[in-house]
Amino acid sequence: MSEALMYLGIDIGTSSVKAVLVDDTDRLLAEAAHPVPIARPRPLWSEQDPDDWWRAVSTVLDRLAAEAPAGMAAVRAIGLSGQMLGVTLLDAADRPVRPALLWNDGRASAECAALHDVFADFPDIVGCRAMPGFSAPKLLWLSRHEPAGLSRTRRILLPKDYVRLRLTGAHASDRADASAMLLMDTRRGDWHDGIIAACGIDRAWLPRLVDSAEVSGGVRPGLAARWRLAPGTPVVGGAGDNMCAGVGVGAVAPDDAYISLGTSGVYFVANDVFAPARGAGMHTHRHAVAGLYCQQAVVLSAAAALAWIAGVLGRSDIGALLAEVEAAQLSPADTPVFTPYLAGERTPHDDPHLTATFSGLTHSTGPAHLVHAVLEGVALALADGHEALAASGARLRRLTLTGGGARSRLWARLIASAIDMPVSAAVREGPALGAARLARAGAGGPLLAGAEASSDAIVPETALRDALLEKRKAFHAHLRLRRLVP
């Protein structure tokens, strides 16, 4: 095995950093993960220390070097994936000026409106309306509220690109991840000077742009020695975690789609045309695959909602909790309504102030009912996203379910029935795998090792579909009370 060519994929997630070591056939040799803390110092704020990303990356690579030294020595290229939209400000010495503002940070609502006042054609340029979690409005917020910190800034990087800087010394980003910053002419694939100026920043602070499978730099000598890598091991551009997850599940052709049940719930559709999203909290960016774009609907709290209710119930083993709930064989008619808006919502409401609720609680409501309701609520929110994508003209040919939550067959059944479409669970999955595949493509190999395998399709169940349709009426009735649904 040590003679096989290996590829390393590193994913800088919101809750953890994960790395995988795979060969030319996608066979997994080793993997490691390490948690990353998150801070919410004020309502709507969500931040992380960029150095926590680097500490986690160092920990997982130390572990891989110890557990698979021959595999690390055979690594031909490295790919990077990461949580998208995060704003990392660096000073002249490449040190963080402040904690990074994350994708689920909701402080910049006023700045979204300001950008639309200046650019009436904003969605046509960047691919969607400005929304609070995106980079451009957050940068405008910083220019208005923290001008001293912004005056010290000399570089602005996305989360995975800060890791690239620490790995290689290169200030670079890929065009896929960078397109979601809303600072780019997305069709042209280059920064938009007018939007950059409107956000109060300097173009010189932004990274050099590369393609997702293009080499951006080589691993620093000291780090290569530490992790048993070849000197100067190339690091390719990589992509945002949503694009890398698409590569990881094989959604690399027009009309391929997946739903990811991670911290957030992402409904991703590959497209061969640029279809700007002009509302409903959807967004369109460049895919990691040359010539493709991606349309996305996002539920900000998916597995995060499940983790929240498990914490409320004092249950640390979420797998065991899900097994108990599945064994209870509950119906949506037995459970309360849950709206999963713990961190505001993007699709279709575009409202950072929206909050989560339970309604329909009774004396008979127990822990299993609450957990089941959370799973239903996320499924119904994804059904809203499905409807919004369909209304935009997105074509759905093949739908794969991925992410940690996809391991729950109950959740998969609820989602398939809520959206009334078969779904298949990915056998190979994850942004880290997609990053490793991009590394392989950058080293001259194939993007995919062969035909993508998936589990048997989980089809909509008539009784469950009908029960969820009835539940959706109550779900939307609650939203109508808040004047969100006509």
Image: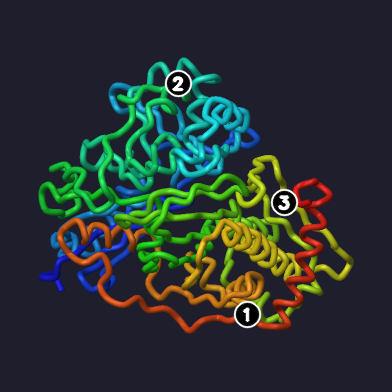
Q: Sequence order check: which comes first, mark 2 or mark 3?
A: 2
Label 1 vs 2, first from the N-terminus: 2
Hey, which quadrant is residue 73 in on the image?
A: bottom left
Residue type at mark 2 is Gly
| Amino acid found under the numbered disc labelled 1 | Pro
Residue 200's label in the rendered image is 2
Label 1 vs 3, first from the N-terminus: 3
Q: Which residue is mark 1?
A: 460
Under tag 1, what secondary structure? loop
Residue at x 22% of width, y 37% of height = 170
Amino acid beneath label 3: Ala
Give the camera-side residue of 419 and 45: 419
Which residue in the protein does label 3 denote? 356
Label annotation for residue 389 = none
Vertical placement of residue 36 versus 143, above or below: below
Q: Residue at x 51, y 55 (%)?
A: 296
Residue at image coords 37%, 72%: 428
Residue 294 visible in the snapshot: yes
**Residue 307 visible in the snapshot:** no
Alpha carbon distance from label 1 to label 2: 49 Å
Of 311 and 214, nearer the camera is 214
Q: Position of residue 69 (x, y in %)?
A: 18, 62
Q: Residue 321: x, y in percent?
A: 63, 71
